[in-house]
Image (cartoon, rainbow, N blue to C red):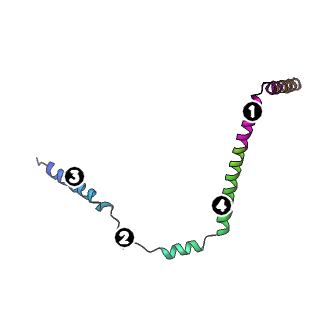
Amino acid sequence: MIDTSRIEQSIENAIIKLIQSGETFKIDYNNRIDISQELKHVYATIDRAKVFARIKELIEEELAQKLVNKLLTEMGTDIKNLMSNATIRDDFKYLLRKSVDDILQKVK
């Protein structure tokens, strides 16, 4: 039987040396394809009105979301302040119970 361990070790060493030298991932920049004309053509054919319309939509959505979040935060703070006052909290509970009782009477 043939001992292949020396061959395997030699192949392993060659692969390690190839990876360490970076030759396997080397990019030959001298053989690049010039696509500047294609890019200029693509850029010239962009419908700027559609781009601006889409940007406007995205900004409006973002602005609306931020406004809603700010309003919800403010409302939460206001409700927390109101509910920290025992008299106002009791008044709210009374009104809430009265409303629930009215609804239950209508359902019956």
Closer to the N terminus: mark 2 or mark 3? 3
- Amino acid type indicated by mark 1: Asn
Closer to the N terminus: mark 4 or mark 3? 3
Name the residue that disc number 3 marks: 12
Marks 2 and 3: which is nearer the front? 2
- Amino acid type indicated by mark 3: Glu
Local SS, label 4: helix
How far apart are labels 2 and 4 at the CA level?
A: 36 Å
Q: Is residue 72 above or below residue 103?
A: below
Residue 72 inside the magenta-drawn segment: yes
Q: Residues within 10 Å of mark 4 (few under 14, many from 20)?
A: few
Query: Horizontal placement of 59 versus 105: left or right?
Result: left
How far apart are labels 2 and 3 at the CA level?
A: 29 Å
Instruction: Estimate the x, y position of residue 71 in percent, counting from the top left.
Output: 73, 43
Name the residue that disc number 4 marks: 55
Name the residue that disc number 1 marks: 81
- Amino acid type indicated by mark 4: Ile
Can I make out residue 62 in this image? yes
**Residue range (magenta):** 71-93
Confirm or deny contact between disc 2 and disc 4 (CB under 8 A).
no
Q: In which quadrant of the rendered image does the C terminus lie?
A: top right
Q: Residues within 10 Å of mark 3 (few under 14, many from 20)?
A: few
Q: Which mark is residue 29?
A: 2
- Amino acid type indicated by mark 2: Tyr
Local SS, label 2: helix
Q: Residues within 10 Å of mark 2 (few under 14, many from 20)?
A: few
